[in-house]
Amino acid sequence: MKAKILLFAAVLMVTVFVFASVPHPNTIIYEHERAAETLDPAMVIDTASGQILSNVYETLIQPAGTSLTRYAPVLSTNVPSVKDGTILDSGKTYIFHIRRGVHFHNGDLLTPQDIVYSLERAVVVGMAGGDSYQLTEPLLPKINGNYVTNLTQWAVKLAGVKSWSDLFATGTSTPKNEKYKKALIDAFNLMSRDFQVKGYNIIIHLPHAYSPFFDSLISNMAMVMDKKWATAHGAWPGTANTWWKYHNPVRQKDPLYSITNGTGPFELYKWVKGREVILERFDAYWKGPAKVKYVVIKTVPEFTTRKLDLIRGNADIISVPPQYIGQVENIKGVEVSRNIPGSAEYQISFAFSVNPHSKYIYSGKLDGNGIPPDFFSNLDVRKGFEYLFPHGIYIKEVWNGMGTEPNGPIYKGLLGYDPNIPKYHQNLSKAKEYFKKAYNGELWKKGFKVAIIYNSTDPTMRQACEILKTYAMRVNPKFKIILVPTLWASLVNEFLSNEIPLIALDWFSTSSYNRVYGYLSSHGVYALALGQKFRKFAQKEFDPLINAAVSAPNLNEAKKVYQEIGMKVYKEALMIWLIHPSRRLVYRKWLKGLYPENYNPFRTKDLVFYNLSK
């Protein structure tokens, strides 16, 4: 490995010397502010990891161009349809013709069994707060009319116990008895029976029609890996009688945490955690080799450093906070694309309840020096906060107008977007009104102290928090919001551990269902973070609606349900919706094929480097 790294450095030096006008012409360098958290597709919830893996792994299908409703084949040679007879049984049976002659990076040939293994493994891993629900819901039968979001739910039901931990001897992954072991195996078999392999065809028999199934198959969860390689490296071996030992691993102890073996155009060359990832061209790629030899994805938190690297030619493309776009628009040799529709929304989220020992609630009491753990379960409190925020100022001055104010979890362009759902606008008189109502006037009298946490590398989030703090104190000087910048990895861990009462965050997703599920389902990632009180609330108020949306007999009916969800979100003042941003790509003009030919704004994994050249 050391020799290989030295060789890579030598190649860079030679190419810079020979092609001085276009530095390192066989390497693309992309600098952005976030660091990858994992290289295992089944464990991904962050966009930095997805960015890497979308160039290493592939799925059966992918979005077609910039469409939200059309798909193109990848490892399948077809996109199933009713018209050609590959969707049958009223949308419950899908037939995929698997592409032949595709090699993994280690030389193994892709087989249909690899695809079945990869889909099943994503369900088996079932990381808490992760996205495995995207496959679990379509692949497992419902329980009491509700979609199942984790394989453990069926194991618990079949065993007749109250919780997952009841199945095992204390502190172990050993079932307490044969009855419980059989329940675990039977739960897995409810999923495995969905898959049928006939030659190079995979037939998937869903237990129920599931309208977002194609969206599930383009997610990180559906990335295909080599079964033989994965099991040789200690991953789940594909057996029904061991799956629970591999369920919900600690991220860093996951055997595939830092290694990869996909079928994509690039393979992993090197990962320096928190700093950079180097990808190397896979010359045996089934579409033919990529146009460049290497891709270097660097984590560079400071914009000034990224800008200097762009000017000097040490970076080909960089991420630029919107307030700094003016600093790069007139740099010689630099291209700034026009606004591109984005797939994210930024919001400030209220935890209905947090760990009572959280350091971010200070005294833990309504005494002016803290807040109670369930402070934000109070609707008057949430509405008071909603009326503090000046969206127009934020979008204009912080984002340079690059985006629009959302009115809920579903943004314009997605199924169920309703422009008639109201928005909260700054109204300090109304903010006072609701704060005075909260806690029978005690809140107004005593004040509060609470921390707001944000990603330390994102200046737009810092400014949103500062704005909220400023107007809270303007309304009542006893209202104290403490800004706590936090590194992304620590932020994610504390968020998922229900330690954070108030957080500024962004969420990337490209389908209405995944958006409402992630934000609002009692099993979604936000529910894990926003506390037990939120989960109970969501279970009653949102789970039935979310199930109705995905089970709707047609898109018009689904649209109505999504609009009902959006109105309920507004009435309950669940989050401060900050912005649905558009983006601008900032890159050297010598970079070819980036925009618009090779950029899909509706994929959460920003850039695919296969067609890029210099």
Image: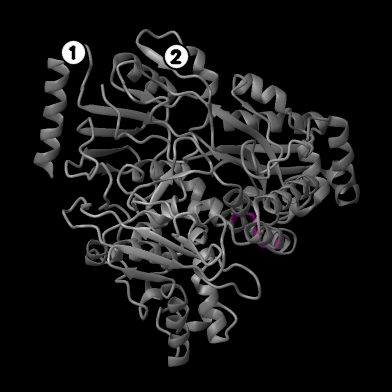
- Which mark, residue 20? 1
Left or right of 289: which side holds 522?
A: right
Q: Quadrant of residue 253?
A: bottom left
Question: Mark 1 packing: few (<14 Cα in 10 Å), some, or many (20+)?
Answer: few
Q: Position of residue 472 (x, y in %)?
A: 76, 33
Q: Given the image, on which type of amino acid does mark 2 rest?
A: Val
Residue assigned mark 2: 328
Q: Main secondary structure of the magenta part?
A: helix
Q: Position of residue 349 (x, y in %)?
A: 66, 45
| Residue at image point 38% right, 59% down | 96
Number of marks present in the image shown: 2
The quadrant of the rendering that contains the N terminus is top left
Residue range (magenta): 529-533
Tell me, yes or no, whether the highlighted magenta stretch contains residue 111: no
Disc 2 from disc 1: Cα separation: 22 Å
Element marked by disc 1: loop
